Amino acid sequence: MFADRQDAGAQLAERLREFTGAGDVVVVGLPRGGVPVAFEVARALRAPLDVVLIRKLGVPFQPELGFGAIGEGGVRVLNQDIVRMAGLSQEEMAAVEVREQRELLRRVRRYRGDRPPVDLARRTVIVVDDGIATGGTARAACQVARAQGARRVVLAVPVGAPSTVAAMSDVADEVVCLRTPASFHAIGSWYADFTQTGDDEVIELLRRAAALAHGRRTEPAASPPGIPLGEVEVEAGGVRLPGHLTVPDEAAGIVVFVHGSGSGRHSPRNRYVAGHLNRAGLGTLLFDLLTWQEELDRRKVFDIELLARRLLQVTAWLREVPQAAGLPIGYFGASTGAAAALWAAAEPDHDIAAIVSRGGRPDLAGARLGLVRAPTLLIVGGRDEVVLDLNRAAQERLHCDNELRIVPGATHLFAEPGTLEAVADLARDWFAGHFRPLVAAAPPRPAH
């Protein structure tokens, strides 16, 4: 038995001491009960601490029974056995998901405030909770970390049901569990003090962890040489949209990321791909197509024409930015964002150099598909059967130079090891191949 979550965290940290001081380690806790445990682990390992936000999807007539979970970055995990057992319809599941998505967004804003999430790309991520029973939330958390580009995922808990712990090896590279009692009944029964953790405690622990990390750092981390980073705001459709613009020296072009399904500029998968493009000498603009209030309205999330009109206004703004003057512009669209990118690119006199769609819904661009002139690359996961069929049908309606590339073994979110890297490589080559001839043929850019 553990005295409390702090005691459990200290004991767990002892088992994880091989990670102490490793520069690529990040500890993430599951709110709320997992955060006090994770704080002790992060402090002992001298690693940054963040939270991984997950919301259980409960069966409407029995909310404590989860039929799945959702997480940041659009991660969605379903337990098909429970869906079938409960006889849930698509409408019932969608209603629960909309409600939990709102709560997820609320907690993101409450726990982090204006602080951006810790970047998990190419890092060892230690996912910590105070215990696992059925494992649905921990499983989703590991998938979120993987979707955010984690190089290695370690699931660490003080106590867990033996069968559940054994099953976690399919989502984590390593599972560390201090106690796996055969007579496991409930997580709380293995703690002398299992007092509920509140939001205020989570926020305070994150603040303390950030202060410790700041105290350890002697100087700010340097940006990649020649890559100015900048937060921007663009007025479009009567609202101000925040974004992040990155322009390397001698950039071959700028890629505008068009997020889908309520995602935004903090999308971990798109940030991973953007970093890949930056290192290849390509500029990137990640921005929010919708305000956070608008994201709660599912009609706006799927209003492709609204998203496309805003994208056109953002593109017009980008062409006036001195660092981007005269550079080719491309679109990288994901999910519904791919439809918005294709819709916008079909506008007359709208000169887009290249388009890449990742797990996109080009079919939602409708009749405008046949008007797209920009070379278009469609990337789909080999195990994303429904979206793959939609992309094949949409490809037949494209009259521009186009290709369909399938990433073997990948599902819709490209959360499987190596699959997101494959997407980044394909996007880099497509944009570079279509940008560079245009740059070579263009007159010299004016100095700024």
Image: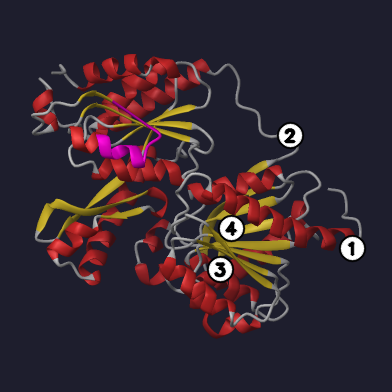
**Mark 2 vs 1: CB contact within 8 A:** no
Residue 232 seen in this snapshot: no
Q: What residue is shown with label 3?
A: 310
**Mark 1 vs 3: CB contact within 8 A:** no
Q: Position of residue 151 (x, y in %)?
A: 50, 36
Q: Which mark, residue 225?
A: 2
Q: What residue is shown with label 4?
A: 257
| Type of amino acid at the residue the image marks with label 3 | Arg
**Residues under labels 2 and 3: Cα distance?**
32 Å
Q: Which mark, residue 441?
A: 1
Q: Which span is picked out in magenta?
A: 166-176
Q: Is residue 429 above or below residue 402?
A: above
Residue 196 as seen in the image, left or right of residue 6: left
Q: Residue at x 27, y 20 (%)?
A: 9
How is the rendered protein coloured? secondary structure
Q: Is residue 49 above or below residue 336?
A: above
Q: Residue at x 76, y 62 (%)?
A: 434
Q: Give the SS element for disc 2.
A: loop
For discs 1 and 3, the disc positioned in front in the rendered view:
1
Which quadrant of the figure has residue 233? bottom right
Residue 233 as seen in the image, left or right of residue 4: right
| Type of amino acid at the residue the image marks with label 4 | Phe
| Type of amino acid at the residue the image marks with label 1 | Ala
Q: Position of residue 202 (x, y in %)?
A: 29, 31
| Type of amino acid at the residue the image marks with label 2 | Pro
Mark 4 vs 2, N-terminal side: 2
Mark 1 vs 3, N-terminal side: 3
**Residues under labels 2 and 1: Cα distance?**
27 Å
Mark 1 neighbour density, 10 Å: few (under 14) some (14–19) many (20 or more): few
**Residues under labels 4 and 2: Cα distance?**
22 Å
**Mark 2 vs 3: CB contact within 8 A:** no
